[in-house]
Amino acid sequence: MPESTLTDLVAGAVGEGLAVKFMNHRKISGQLPNPSDILSGKVKDLKTKEISAMYSLTVSLCYELQQAHINKEKNWNDMADRFFNYMMDNFETELVVMGAKIALTNYKLPFDPSKLKSFDRFHKKFGKYVITAMESK
């Protein structure tokens, strides 16, 4: 289906302004790494710095972590470490804090700081922001 046809179809459902935003996000989201590859350690870098793409990726990572916890995956703490390291290495402060808040509040991920190698680095750099974000909820 040609892109203009898809844009027209989306615009018919949600309006032209939202359709343009959706199509732009669609282009960028195609460049995002697979969340499973991040959590397994295969991917460590992010090529785009577009905020909506990073937000979308963060939500996908939280979902993958939640499913791994539900399935009682033995390497869950390693995956959680990769989640925090990936955000710290690729996102601005605000997105790292948002990612932690989403993981804790929306997905109720049971991080155990004593089992996370990344926790000291995370807490030292972002702990005060996360506490403030959690208090404002």
Image: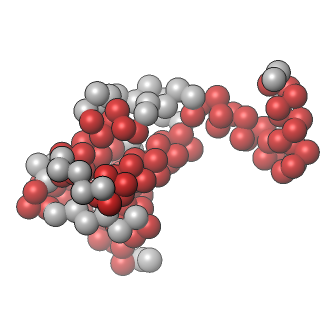
Where is residue 42 drawn, in percent x and y?
28, 27
Which residue appears at 83% of the width and 41% of the height?
10
Q: Where is residue 25 in the image (x, y as percent from the top left)?
A: 64, 37
**Left or right of 44, for residue 81:** left
Which sits in the foreground, 58 or 60? 60
Q: Report how many numbered discs are placed on residues in the image.
A: 0
Kindly indicate the quadrant of the structure image that contains residue 129.
bottom left
Residue sitting at x 10%, y 57% = 115
Which of the two residues, 64 or 133, is positioned nearer the viewer here?
64
Question: Which of the 4 image quarters holds residue 89?
Answer: top left
Q: Name the residue located 65 percent from the left edge and 34 percent from the top edge.
A: 26
Residue farthest to the front, as pictured: 71
Which quarter of the picture shows residue 20? top right
Q: Is residue 100 visible?
A: no
Q: Where is residue 90 in the image (x, y as percent from the top left)?
A: 35, 37
**Hey, which residue is sitting farthest top in the picture?**
2
Residue 9 makes an appearance in the image:
yes
Q: What quarter of the picture does the C terminus occupy?
A: bottom left
